[in-house]
């Protein structure tokens, strides 16, 4: 069934979500939701929001001892790097606004200070090892191949509050219409 048959190609922008199509064969992106942090003529990058790793922040960053925030796999690129999103520019400086209430963190020293002084709280932050990246034109080619569904403008609730197990389904369901139907597709179509 071609559930994209009548879809016009939607050009993504910073702050949009990329929702993987239900049967995307790449195991790195199976049933994933990516927050797009940049998209321009040079390429695109973002973080997978619903793929938790087995690590917690205090295991990866010695200075964050006792801060037991979950760490997510942001994507397959540079998995030796640590990134973060947060809700509050008043508590952390120099960060980049993605959408209202969602900021891409740049100041790790400020983050550690905010953690150690208990200004930053775990529910205000989301951490990632690695990221998802596309070279110039690559993401648009994947959109033409119908690998992704573009959800216009993420919300802080979807980014920070939704359980990883429910995010893919919830985002599609929020889009309504045929996407609500797609959200109920089984993981394995043979079980249908």
Image (cartoon, helix red, strand yellow):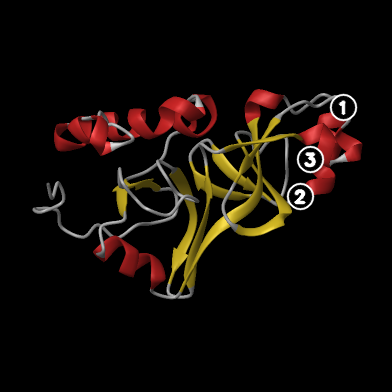
Up the image or down, 17 lies above or below 141; here it is above
Residue beneath the point at 49% across and 32% down: 156
Residue 191 percent across, percent down from the top left: 26, 30
102 or 71: nearer the viewer: 71
Residue 31 percent across, percent down from the top left: 40, 41
Residue 189 percent across, percent down from the top left: 25, 37
The local crowd at label 1, few if under 14, some if 14 to 19, many if 20 or more residues have their Cα within 10 Å, is few
Question: Mark 1 falls on what kind of element?
Answer: loop
- Mark 1 and mark 3 lie on one chain; the one further toward the N terminus is 3
The residue that disc 2 covers is 107
Q: Is residue 112 left or right of residue 98?
A: right
The local crowd at label 2, few if under 14, some if 14 to 19, many if 20 or more residues have their Cα within 10 Å, is few
* Tags 2 and 1 touching, CB below 8 Å: no
The residue that disc 1 covers is 117
Quote the CA–CA distance across marks 2 and 1.
Answer: 15 Å
- Mark 2 and mark 1 lie on one chain; the one further toward the N terminus is 2
Residue beneath the point at 29% across and 61% down: 143
The residue that disc 3 covers is 111
């Amino acid at each position: 069934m071609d559930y994209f048959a009548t879809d016009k190609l939607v050009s993504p922008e910073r702050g949009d979500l990329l929702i993987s199509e239900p049967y995307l064969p790449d195991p790195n992106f199976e049933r994933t939701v990516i927050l797009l942090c940049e998209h321009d003529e040079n390429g695109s990058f973002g973080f997978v929001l619903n793929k938790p790793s087995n690590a917690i922040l205090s295991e990866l960053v010695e200075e964050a001892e006792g801060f037991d925030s979950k760490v997510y796999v942001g994507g397959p690129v540079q998995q030796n790097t640590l990134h973060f999103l947060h809700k509050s520019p008043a508590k952390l400086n120099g960060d980049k606004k993605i959408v209202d209430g969602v900021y891409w963190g740049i100041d790790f020293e400020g983050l550690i200070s905010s953690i150690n002084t208990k200004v930053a709280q775990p529910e205000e932050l989301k951490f990632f090892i690695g990221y998802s990246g596309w070279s110039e034109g690559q993401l648009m080619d994947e959109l033409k191949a119908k690998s992704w569904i573009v959800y216009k403008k993420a919300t802080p609730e979807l980014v920070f509050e939704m359980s990883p197990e429910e995010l893919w389904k919830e985002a599609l369901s929020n889009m309504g219409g045929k996407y609500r139907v797609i959200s109920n597709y089984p993981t394995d179509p043979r079980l249908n």
